[in-house]
Image: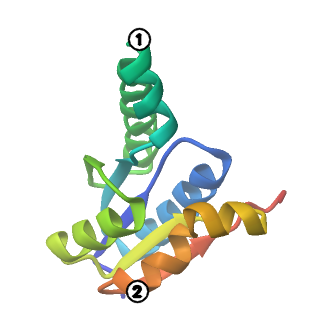
Amino acid sequence: MYQKILLAYDGSQEGRAALKQGAELATMCKADVCLLAVMSPDIGVIYAEAAVPSDLPDRMLAEIKASLQEGKAKLQDRGLSVETRLENGIPANEIGRVAQEINADLIVVGHREQGALARWWGGSTGASLLAHAPCSILIAIAKDA
Protein backbone atom coordinates (compact mmCIF):
# COMPACT_ATOMS: atom_id res chain seq x y z
CA MET A 1 0.00 0.00 0.00
CA TYR A 2 2.56 2.63 1.14
CA GLN A 3 6.20 2.31 0.16
CA LYS A 4 7.58 5.69 1.30
CA ILE A 5 6.18 7.57 4.29
CA LEU A 6 7.17 11.13 5.16
CA LEU A 7 6.76 11.62 8.87
CA ALA A 8 6.85 15.22 10.15
CA TYR A 9 8.30 15.18 13.67
CA ASP A 10 9.18 17.86 16.17
CA GLY A 11 9.30 15.94 19.45
CA SER A 12 6.03 17.47 20.72
CA GLN A 13 3.11 15.42 22.05
CA GLU A 14 1.43 15.79 18.66
CA GLY A 15 4.64 14.81 16.91
CA ARG A 16 4.95 11.70 19.10
CA ALA A 17 1.40 10.69 18.12
CA ALA A 18 2.37 11.08 14.44
CA LEU A 19 5.58 9.10 15.04
CA LYS A 20 3.68 6.24 16.72
CA GLN A 21 0.94 6.01 14.10
CA GLY A 22 3.37 6.49 11.22
CA ALA A 23 5.63 3.77 12.64
CA GLU A 24 2.70 1.35 12.91
CA LEU A 25 1.72 1.98 9.28
CA ALA A 26 5.31 1.74 8.04
CA THR A 27 5.77 -1.55 9.89
CA MET A 28 2.56 -3.02 8.44
CA CYS A 29 3.43 -1.84 4.92
CA LYS A 30 7.17 -2.51 5.17
CA ALA A 31 7.64 1.09 4.03
CA ASP A 32 10.73 3.27 4.18
CA VAL A 33 10.42 6.34 6.38
CA CYS A 34 11.73 9.86 5.96
CA LEU A 35 11.66 11.61 9.31
CA LEU A 36 11.44 15.36 8.73
CA ALA A 37 11.82 18.29 11.09
CA VAL A 38 11.23 21.83 9.87
CA MET A 39 12.65 24.89 11.58
CA SER A 40 10.16 27.63 10.84
CA PRO A 41 11.20 31.27 10.95
CA ASP A 42 9.89 32.76 14.19
CA ILE A 43 9.64 36.51 13.74
CA GLY A 44 9.90 37.09 17.51
CA VAL A 45 13.19 35.19 17.71
CA ILE A 46 14.51 37.02 14.63
CA TYR A 47 13.76 40.42 16.20
CA ALA A 48 15.14 39.39 19.59
CA GLU A 49 18.36 38.11 18.00
CA ALA A 50 18.75 41.36 16.07
CA ALA A 51 18.43 43.37 19.29
CA VAL A 52 20.38 41.13 21.67
CA PRO A 53 22.26 38.24 20.08
CA SER A 54 22.20 35.03 22.12
CA ASP A 55 22.73 31.31 21.72
CA LEU A 56 18.96 30.70 21.37
CA PRO A 57 19.07 29.72 17.66
CA ASP A 58 21.90 27.25 18.38
CA ARG A 59 19.97 25.75 21.31
CA MET A 60 16.81 25.45 19.19
CA LEU A 61 18.79 23.70 16.45
CA ALA A 62 20.38 21.33 18.97
CA GLU A 63 16.95 20.45 20.42
CA ILE A 64 15.50 19.74 16.98
CA LYS A 65 18.50 17.59 16.02
CA ALA A 66 18.16 15.67 19.31
CA SER A 67 14.43 15.12 18.63
CA LEU A 68 15.22 13.80 15.15
CA GLN A 69 17.79 11.37 16.56
CA GLU A 70 15.33 10.23 19.25
CA GLY A 71 12.62 9.65 16.63
CA LYS A 72 15.06 7.85 14.33
CA ALA A 73 16.13 5.52 17.15
CA LYS A 74 12.49 4.67 17.96
CA LEU A 75 11.79 3.85 14.32
CA GLN A 76 14.96 1.82 13.91
CA ASP A 77 14.07 -0.14 17.07
CA ARG A 78 11.01 -1.29 15.10
CA GLY A 79 13.27 -2.47 12.28
CA LEU A 80 12.37 0.38 9.92
CA SER A 81 14.66 1.97 7.34
CA VAL A 82 14.87 5.67 8.27
CA GLU A 83 16.29 8.75 6.59
CA THR A 84 16.30 12.01 8.58
CA ARG A 85 15.99 15.50 7.14
CA LEU A 86 16.12 18.93 8.71
CA GLU A 87 14.77 21.79 6.61
CA ASN A 88 14.21 25.50 7.17
CA GLY A 89 11.08 27.34 6.08
CA ILE A 90 7.32 27.35 6.37
CA PRO A 91 6.36 23.86 7.60
CA ALA A 92 3.52 23.14 5.15
CA ASN A 93 5.60 24.27 2.18
CA GLU A 94 8.65 22.27 3.24
CA ILE A 95 6.66 19.13 4.06
CA GLY A 96 4.98 19.27 0.64
CA ARG A 97 8.27 19.97 -1.15
CA VAL A 98 10.15 17.14 0.57
CA ALA A 99 7.24 14.72 0.02
CA GLN A 100 7.39 15.45 -3.69
CA GLU A 101 11.19 15.26 -3.75
CA ILE A 102 11.29 11.79 -2.16
CA ASN A 103 8.16 10.52 -3.95
CA ALA A 104 6.29 9.89 -0.69
CA ASP A 105 3.04 7.91 -0.83
CA LEU A 106 1.88 9.25 2.52
CA ILE A 107 2.57 12.22 4.78
CA VAL A 108 1.96 11.81 8.51
CA VAL A 109 1.64 14.90 10.71
CA GLY A 110 0.38 15.51 14.23
CA HIS A 111 -2.64 17.67 15.02
CA ARG A 112 -2.11 20.64 17.31
CA GLU A 113 -5.26 22.31 18.62
CA GLN A 114 -5.16 26.08 18.08
CA GLY A 115 -7.48 28.88 18.95
CA ALA A 116 -9.08 31.07 16.27
CA LEU A 117 -6.52 33.86 16.76
CA ALA A 118 -3.56 31.48 16.40
CA ARG A 119 -5.05 30.00 13.22
CA TRP A 120 -5.67 33.47 11.84
CA TRP A 121 -2.19 34.73 12.72
CA GLY A 122 -0.08 31.73 11.79
CA GLY A 123 -2.44 29.55 9.82
CA SER A 124 -2.87 25.83 10.20
CA THR A 125 -0.05 23.64 8.91
CA GLY A 126 -2.51 20.79 8.22
CA ALA A 127 -4.89 22.99 6.25
CA SER A 128 -2.03 24.62 4.32
CA LEU A 129 -0.52 21.22 3.64
CA LEU A 130 -3.69 20.15 1.83
CA ALA A 131 -2.87 22.74 -0.82
CA HIS A 132 0.76 21.57 -1.20
CA ALA A 133 0.63 17.81 -0.67
CA PRO A 134 1.51 15.58 -3.62
CA CYS A 135 0.10 12.50 -1.86
CA SER A 136 -2.27 11.31 0.86
CA ILE A 137 -2.07 12.81 4.36
CA LEU A 138 -2.69 11.21 7.75
CA ILE A 139 -3.29 13.68 10.55
CA ALA A 140 -2.53 11.85 13.77
CA ILE A 141 -4.42 12.80 16.90
CA ALA A 142 -3.04 11.85 20.31
CA LYS A 143 -5.38 9.38 22.03
CA ASP A 144 -5.23 11.26 25.36
CA ALA A 145 -6.16 14.60 23.73
Q: Which mark lies nearer to you, 2 or 1? A: 1
Identity of the residue drawn at 37% across and 42% down: 72
Residue 85 or residue 41, whichever sits in front:
41
Where, by quadrant of the figure, is residue 93 drawn? bottom left
Where, by quadrant of the figure, is residue 136 drawn? bottom left
Where, by quadrant of the figure, is residue 67 drawn? top left
Q: Which residue is mark 2?
A: 131
Q: How many marks?
A: 2
Q: Residues within 10 Å of mark 2 (few under 14, many from 20)?
A: few
Q: Which residue is mark 1?
A: 54
Residue 122 coordinates in the image, percent (x, y)? 56, 61
User: Callout 2, which amino acid?
Assistant: Ala
Identity of the residue drawn at 34% across and 86% down: 135
Residue 119 or residue 14, whichever sits in front:
119
Q: Quadrant of the N terminus?
A: bottom left
37 left or right of 116 in image:
left
